[in-house]
Image: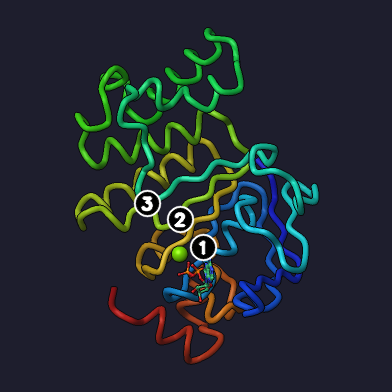
């Protein structure tokens, strides 16, 4: 577990600035949602935290340690994407073990961590299956399993539920929140869906056009929106 700090973060793509000086402190153990319309810079900010995007200006820290220039593999973060990115030719167990296998960890330790994650995610009965023999929700859980086995300091989610049907989406919201309540790992979760944000966040960060418009609890931003944009965005039907 660790805090996350963005200090005056600027990002440009080929000279075009898309993030204009983002300042944000994320407390240890919090579930923070970056919310805003498509193109406002949520994924870019998340990818800079993950080390997948070069930083044009400013500083990113995890647990008080400056991350600028630190390789993604050395950041102890885990990212869950919307398309799962599971390996089709591997079993659930192998998918979950993969990052630890790469690190040449002890087989007994790997087994122990996979079994622990499978239990938390109710995947014990599916460990020997291939992803194609799983439901959408189960695949999503495998993707989360792959993230939690590494015991990361921070979880990053980029619109993980946007490919799921409405019913499953609601179920997975609950599962992700339960997972957070069990593990209390600092989480940064990106969505453009205000209902998802309002139901899941401890803190919601509302973004527009590369800036932060407001930071607060769901109740605070709902009751006291900082401006018309926030009011309309929060109030808009999903
Ligand atoms: P969001 O995740 O909120 O939808 P993004 O972070 O993906 O927004 O994008 C923010 C802005 O940066 C958009 O204007 C997008 O077109 C631009 N952008 C994102 N990635 C790239 C890239 N690799 N090259 C050029 N422009 C990009
Ligand atoms: Mg995005």
Are discs 1 and 2 less than 8 Å apart at CB? yes
| The CB of the residue at mark 1 lies under 8 Å from ligand 2 | yes
Inter-mark Cα distance, 3 to 1 = 12 Å
Q: What element carries label 2?
A: strand
Q: Which residue appears at 42% of the width and 17% of the height?
A: 115
Residue 128 in the image: above or below residue 185:
above
Q: Which residue appears at 62% of the width and 57% of the height?
A: 53
Does label 3 or label 1 sit earlier along the sequence?
A: 1
In the rendered view, does 18 fall on the left or right side of 194?
Answer: right
Are discs 2 and 3 less than 8 Å apart at CB? yes
Does label 1 or label 2 sit earlier along the sequence?
A: 1
Q: Which residue appears at 59% of the width and 47% of the height?
A: 186
| The CB of the residue at mark 2 lies under 8 Å from ligand 2 | yes
Q: In which quarter of the image is residue 105?
A: top right
Does label 2 or label 3 sit earlier along the sequence?
A: 3
Disc assigned to residue 43 = 1
Disc assigned to residue 82 = 3
Instruction: Assess disc 3: are there few (<14), some (14-19) or many (≥20) residues with their C-alpha within 10 Å of its C-alpha.
Output: some
- Please state the horizontal and vertical placement of residue 149, each as a whole percent of the image: 51, 28
């Amino acid at each position: 577990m660790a805090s996350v700090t963005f200090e005056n973060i600027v990002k440009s793509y080929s000279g075009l600035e898309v993030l204009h000086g983002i300042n944000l402190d994320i407390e240890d153990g919090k579930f923070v949602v970056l919310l805003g319309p498509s193109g406002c810079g949520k994924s870019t900010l998340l990818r800079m935290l993950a080390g997948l995007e070069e930083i044009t200006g400013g500083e990113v820290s995890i647990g008080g340690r400056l991350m600028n220039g630190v390789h993604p593999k050395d950041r102890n973060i885990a990212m869950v994407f919307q398309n799962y990115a599971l390996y089709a030719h591997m079993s659930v167990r192998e998918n979950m073990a993969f990052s630890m296998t790469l690190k040449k960890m002890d087989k007994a330790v790997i087994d122990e961590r996979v079994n622990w994650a499978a239990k938390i995610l109710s995947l014990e009965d599916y460990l020997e299956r291939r992803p194609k023999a799983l439901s959408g929700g189960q695949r999503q859980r495998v993707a989360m399993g792959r993230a939690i086995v590494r015991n990361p300091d921070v979880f990053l989610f980029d619109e993980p539920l946007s490919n799921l049907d409405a019913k499953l989406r609601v179920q997975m919201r609950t599962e992700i929140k339960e997972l957070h309540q069990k593990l209390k790992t600092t989480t940064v979760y990106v969505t453009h869906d205000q209902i998802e944000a309002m139901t899941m966040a401890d803190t919601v960060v509302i973004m527009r056009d590369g800036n932060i418009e407001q930071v607060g609890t769901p109740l605070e931003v709902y009751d006291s929106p900082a401006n018309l944009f926030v009011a309309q965005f929060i109030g808009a039907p999903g």
